[in-house]
Amino acid sequence: MRIEPFTPALAAREMRVPTTSDDKYSRGVLGFATGSRSYPGAAVLGVSAALSTGIGMIRFAGDESVADVVISRHPEVVTEPGRVSAWVVGSGMVSSDDESMMLARAALSEGLPSVVDAGAIAVLPVHHRTVATPHAGELAVALGVERSVVTDDPAAMALRAAIHWDATVVLKGSTTYVVNPLGDAYSIKIAPSWLAMAGAGDTLAGIIGALIATRADEIAESGRALARIAATGVFVHSVAAARASGGGPFTLDQLVQRIPAVIRDLVNLA
């Protein structure tokens, strides 16, 4: 398997800019089945990141108490059921929480491009339009191996998972690997070590979700597009983190605030 470093030029090719003929639906509608009573902040972080990445609409289908928290932060979020272009599921959910898993399963059953994160990875069925975003520990649990097996050869284990699930896998770490079942593989090593913090994966899931929602039609036509788009999401997330850090600690709100400028710079590069 050849691993290609994911460059700014590659990320720039995946940018899509709204035109004068676009409306909120054609720009993409991203659904979220995320968060829980124990971890409501995960939903807020993912939604915040998606909105900053650029999306026409967000529909939130998580727990009602979590929805209240999300809307208090982002009143533009819609909680009424309706059509979506893609889903983000699992962030802030616990696999033993039957109610949360039911919501996530219902979203994935639609067969739309989806990001599966955190507690949902080990227990939910995925499909060829899925991006799974585990860290090494979550992937080890999902594959039934020791964590050291994953950390010793992360790219190979990401490929094993991608083939097993028939899905695109984003294996998060100091170097993040994005691999699909066809063996397309990208590496991104930009993010500062300060990014190792609770909630970082929630923002990444929101960014990837926003990007795939704007490209849902293309993903339906080309399975390979999903890996490139997911790698672009990792690139945006990593660069935003590096800018927020500036060599020191930062908050995830500060990361989210940097996302629009990263998108702008990639658009200008294209």
Image (cartoon, grey):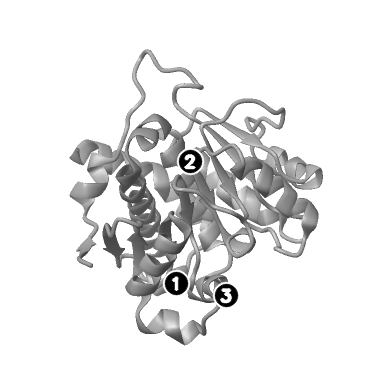
Which quadrant does the N terminus fall into? bottom left
Residue bearing the label numbered 1? 194
Q: CA distance from mark 2 to mark 1?
A: 30 Å
Corner quadrant of residue 239: bottom left
Query: What's the amino acid at mark 2?
Result: Pro
Q: For the residues marked 3 and 2, what is the alpha-carbon distance in whole angstroms?
A: 24 Å
**Secondary structure category for the residue under label 1:** helix
- Would you call the spot at circle 1 few (<14 residues within 10 Å), some (14-19), or many (20 or more)? some
Q: At 30% across and 63% down in the image, what residue appears? A: 188
Position of 161 relative to 115 (above/below): below
Return the residue nearer the eye: 49 or 115: 115
Which residue is labeled 3 in the image?
141
Residue 94's image quarter? Answer: bottom right
The answer to whether residue 50 of the structure is visible from this angle is yes
Viewport quadrant of the C terminus: top left
Check disc 2 and report the residue beneath it.
113
Task: Give coordinates of residue 139: x percent, y percent.
Answer: 51, 71
Inspect this view and state whether residue 253 appears: no
